[in-house]
Amino acid sequence: MNPRFAFVAAPLLVLAYGVIRILDGLDGSRGPGLAWTTGHLAFIAALALFVPIFWEMRRMAGRGALSTVSAVMGSVGILAASAQFVIDIVVGFLSADHAAMGVLFDRIQAVPGVSLAIYDGGPYLFYLGQLALVVQLAVIGRVKAWTPVLVLLDLVLPIVDRDFIPLGAIFLLVSFVPLARGIAPTAKPVASHAARRAATHA
């Protein structure tokens, strides 16, 4: 996958999730239904794109121990967040209404270890890994000093109010565009002069 595509598409998918989430709540409750499922699928797609993003950021940061740990931490967080969103989709399919969803969520989170791994702990590794990588890139001068600030805003705004997810996604897109531009294009193999001459006279 082209890393440039991932850097642009991931924030746009998060933006789509945030907008769909707001629209889904206009009737006073969120899920189950098409909007619930579509929004969650958009965020899962964004999470999948963050895998190549994190490892490209690791490469840009020099592939050192710190950047490797940050990328691994972020990837573990992606797995946890993805599990949470898959559960959300399954619960939506199994529930007749929003109240029934709450009952199923309570049962799932009551399973020992699930709440910490998938809800209260694991997903935060995704955000910590992302911020750590961007800060490292800022320290070595690969991105502007304001880039980590925008990423931090993207991470903090949903904590203040989840309706701010679209705004945070815009900040993330603005911070990721310079990173996408900084990726060197893949060089195409160039035949040697002798090989070209041989092919010409063949």
Image: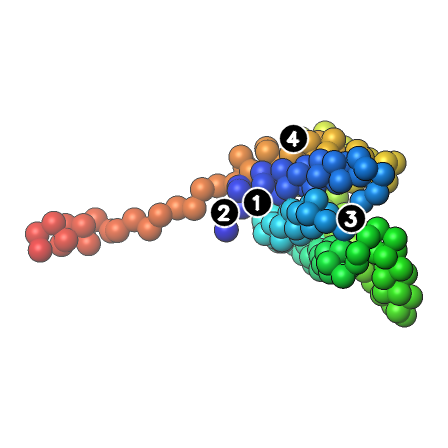
Counting from the top left corner in percent of width and height, residue 117 is at 83, 62
Q: CA distance from mark 1 to mark 3?
A: 28 Å
The amino acid marked with disc number 3 is: Gly
Dot 4 or dot 2, earlier in sequence? 2
Position of residue 63 relative to residue 185, above or below, is below
Residue denoted by label 1: 6
| Res 65 quadrant in image | bottom right
Badge nearest the viewer, 2 or 3: 3
Relative horizontal placement of residue 119, taking residue 138 as reference (left or right):
right
Q: Note whether 144 is above or below 189 in the view shown.
A: above
Q: Residue at x 13, y 54 (%)?
A: 198
Report the front residue among 134 and 119.
Answer: 119
**Kind of residue at badge 2:** Asn
Q: Which residue is mark 3?
A: 31
Q: Camera-side residue: 133 or 51? A: 51
SS under mark 1: helix
Q: Residue 111: image x %, image y %?
A: 88, 69
Q: Residues within 10 Å of mark 3 (few under 14, many from 20)?
A: many
Choose between 15 and 141: the one closer to the eye: 15
* Residue at 79%, 56% in the rendered image: 96
C-beta proximity under 8 Å, tags 2 and 1: yes
Residue 121 visible, this orientation: no
